[in-house]
C-alpha cells in the first residue's frame, strides 16, 4: 500500500515543471569563529565545512549524555547513565548542481548505557533520549534515508525510510518537542502519546507536503502513508507489502495573537493494522487472541509567546490534547500544559527552560472468562517536569532536570516469603543532561 501510494504521488509530480521551482537563497551555515563562540565544537574544518555547506552538503553531529536517578518512589530507586549519538547528513540537490527542489537526508543514530525508565513504574519514559533509535541498549541504526522533492513552491513529496520525530517534524511545538536532547526529557512533552501506537518512530513512508503560502514557517500540511510495522533496526521491506498501513494528516499554521509568535497544529491518524484487543474473552472452545482490525487517533497542540521582546525569544505557553479509540490504543485521552522560555536572561540568548504537567487516561486490559471478568489494574498516568538548559557555549549545553511521575502499574511484588503486593508511589527523578554539538 505504501509503495503504491509512493508511485502515485511520484507520477503526479511529472505534471509539475520541476525546473520552474527555484528555492529562495538560504544562507549556508557558518561554522567559523573562535572556540567559545562558534556553533560547533570542531568548527569549520579549515574552511572545508563552510565550502561544503555552500555546495549543499552539511553534517550535523551531536552527542547527548544523561545521568538520572530515581531518588524515591516508583518500582526501584537508583542511578543510571546513558547517551545517544546522532549524525545527520543533508544534501541539497539544487546547490549541488544536480536538479532543483531535491533534499536527501541520511541519519545514523545509536545509544549506549542505561536509563531509569524501568524503575519509575510510569508508562511514559522519563528519559526520551535513551529510547532512540530503539529502547535497547547499545543500538546503532539508520532511522532515516529519505528524499524530499518539491515540484513547485507549493507542493512536494517525500519517500523513503523516515524518522517521524525529528527537530522540525512530527507534532512540532516551539517549547516542547524533540528527542529529549534540548528541551523536556519526558516523552509526554516531546510527542503526543495517542499517536505513538499507530505511527512508528522509523518506517518506510510516502507523503505529500503542501505549503499554502510557499513558506513552511507560516503554514504546512502533510499527508502520509506509513508502514505501521516499521522499526529503526529493520529495512522494512519485509512488512511494507502486508497491508499494515497507517495514514496520517497534519496541519500547522503560524498565528500572531497579541502581535507575538504562536502556532496551532491539528492532526489525525488511521491505521489498518491488526492489533491485539485490550478486551480478551477466554472461552473454552476458543483459545485465539482477540484482535482489533484498526485504530484511530486525533492530536492537537499549540504554542504561544506571551512575552517576546525579540523574535523567537521570550516566555510563552504550550499545550497538547489527544484522543483515541481506547482499544486497541491504551492511551484513551491525553493532555499537557506548560510554560516555556527562550533567551529570557539578558546576554544568554541560547538558554531555554520549561515547566509542564501532563495527564494520560489509560484503558485497562480486561480478561473475560466463563465465571468472571478480570481487569488488569493500571493507573492513569500523570507527571510534572521542570528543566533549565544552560548554554555554556553554543555547542555545549548543560541541563538540570527534575520530574515527579506516576501511573501505569498500581502494585509491585516485594520479594518476601511469601511475596506480598506493595503499592507503587509517585517517583521523583532528578537528572543532568550534557549535549555536545560537533
Image: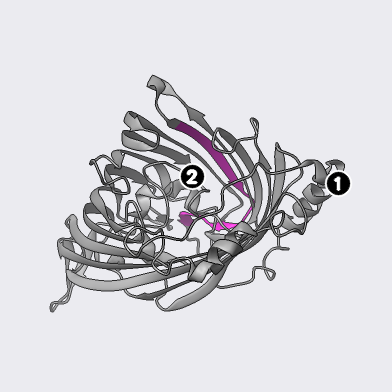
Q: Is residue 370 left or right of residue 233?
A: left
Residue 159 percent coordinates (x, y): 70, 56
Q: Is residue 200 left or right of residue 368?
A: right
Where residue 95 is drawn, which disc sits there?
none
Query: Does residue 268 show up magenta in the picture?
Result: yes
Please tell me whether the stretch drawn in magenta is mainly helix, strand or loop: strand
Instruction: Residue 224: tell me if it is visible.
Output: yes
Instruction: Quote the CA–CA distance across marks 2 and 1.
Output: 30 Å
Residue under pointer 2: 171
Residue 58 percent coordinates (x, y): 57, 62
Quadrant containing the N terminus in the rendered view? bottom right
Which is more foreground, mark 2 or mark 1?
1
Quadrant containing the C terminus in the rendered view? bottom left
Instruction: Residue 287: tell me if it is visible.
Output: no
Query: Are the residues at dot 2 and dot 1 in contact (C-beta closer than 8 Å)?
Result: no
Residue 39 percent coordinates (x, y): 41, 58
Residue under pointer 1: 14
Residue 82's place in the image compared with 153, above or below, is below
| Badge 2 density bin: few <14, some 14–19, many ≥20, Cα 10 Å | many
Query: Does residue 350 show up magenta in the picture?
Result: no
Task: Tell me which residue sits at (30%, 69%) in the image.
Answer: 115
Residue 335's place in the image compared with 237, above or below, is above
- SS at mark 2? loop
| Snapshot quadrant of residue 88 | bottom right
Residue 17's place in the image compared with 125, above or below, is above
Q: How many marks?
A: 2
| First to last magenta residue range | 263-280
Amino acid at each position: 500500500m505504501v509503495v503504491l501510494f509512493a508511485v502515485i504521488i511520484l507520477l503526479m509530480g511529472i505534471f509539475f515543471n520541476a525546473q520552474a521551482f527555484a528555492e529562495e537563497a538560504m544562507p549556508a551555515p557558518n561554522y567559523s569563529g573562535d572556540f567559545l563562540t562558534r556553533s560547533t565544537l570542531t568548527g569549520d574544518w579549515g574552511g572545508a565545512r563552510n565550502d561544503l555547506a555552500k555546495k549543499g552538503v552539511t553534517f550535523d553531529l551531536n552527542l547527548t549524555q544523561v545521568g538520572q536517578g530515581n531518588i524515591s518512589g516508583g518500582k526501584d530507586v537508583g542511578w543510571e547513565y546513558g547517551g545517544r549519538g546522532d549524525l545527520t547528513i543533508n544534501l541539497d540537490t539544487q546547490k549541488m548542481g544536480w536538479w532543483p527542489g531535491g533534499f536527501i537526508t541520511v541519519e545514523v543514530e545509536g545509544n549506549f548505557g542505561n536509563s531509569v525508565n524501568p524503575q519509575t513504574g510510569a508508562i511514559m519514559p522519563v528519559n526520551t533520549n535513551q529510547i532512540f533509535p530503539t529502547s535497547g541498549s547499545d543500538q546503532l541504526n539508520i532511522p532515516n534515508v529519505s528524499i524530499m522533492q518539491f515540484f513547485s513552491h507549493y507542493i512536494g513529496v517525500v519517500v523513503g525510510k523516515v524518522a517521524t520525530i525529528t527537530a522540525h517534524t512530527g507534532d512540532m511545538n516551539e517549547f516542547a518537542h524533540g528527542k529529549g536532547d534540548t528541551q523536556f526529557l519526558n516523552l509526554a512533552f516531546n510527542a503526543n502519546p495517542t499517536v505513538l501506537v499507530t505511527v512508528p518512530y522509523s518506517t518506510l513512508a510516502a507523503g505529500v507536503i503542501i505549503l499554502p503560502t510557499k513558506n513552511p514557517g507560516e503554514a504546512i500540511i502533510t499527508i502520509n502513508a506509513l508502514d505501521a510495522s516499521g522499526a529503526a533496526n529493520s529495512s522494512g521491506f519485509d512488512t511494507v507489502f502486508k497491508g499494515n498501513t497507517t495514514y496520517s494528516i497534519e496541519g500547522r499554521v503560524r498565528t500572531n495573537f497579541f502581535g507575538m509568535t504562536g502556532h496551532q497544529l491539528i492532526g489525525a491518524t488511521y491505521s489498518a493494522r491488526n492489533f491485539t484487543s485490550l478486551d480478551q474473552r477466554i472461552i473454552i472452545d476458543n483459545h485465539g487472541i482477540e484482535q482489533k482490525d484498526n485504530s484511530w487517533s486525533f492530536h492537537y497542540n499549540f504554542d504561544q509567546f506571551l512575552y517576546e521582546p525579540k523574535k523567537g525569544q521570550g516566555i510563552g505557553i504550550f499545550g497538547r490534547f489527544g484522543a483515541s479509540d481506547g482499544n486497541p490504543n491504551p492511551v484513551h485521552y491525553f493532555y499537557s500544559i506548560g510554560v516555556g522560555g527562550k533567551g529570557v536572561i539578558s546576554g544568554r540568548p541560547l538558554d531555554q527552560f520549561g515547566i509542564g504537567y501532563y495527564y494520560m487516561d489509560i484503558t485497562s486490559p480486561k480478561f473475560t472468562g466463563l465465571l468472571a471478568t478480570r481487569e488488569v489494574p493500571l493507573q492513569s498516568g500523570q507527571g510534572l517536569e521542570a528543566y533549565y538548559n544552560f548554554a555554556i557555549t553554543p555547542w555545549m549545553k548543560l541541563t538540570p532536570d527534575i520530574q515527579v511521575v506516576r501511573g501505569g502499574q498500581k502494585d509491585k511484588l516485594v520479594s518476601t516469603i511469601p511475596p506480598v503486593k506493595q503499592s507503587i508511589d509517585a517517583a521523583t527523578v532528578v537528572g543532568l543532561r550534557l549535549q555536545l554539538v560537533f
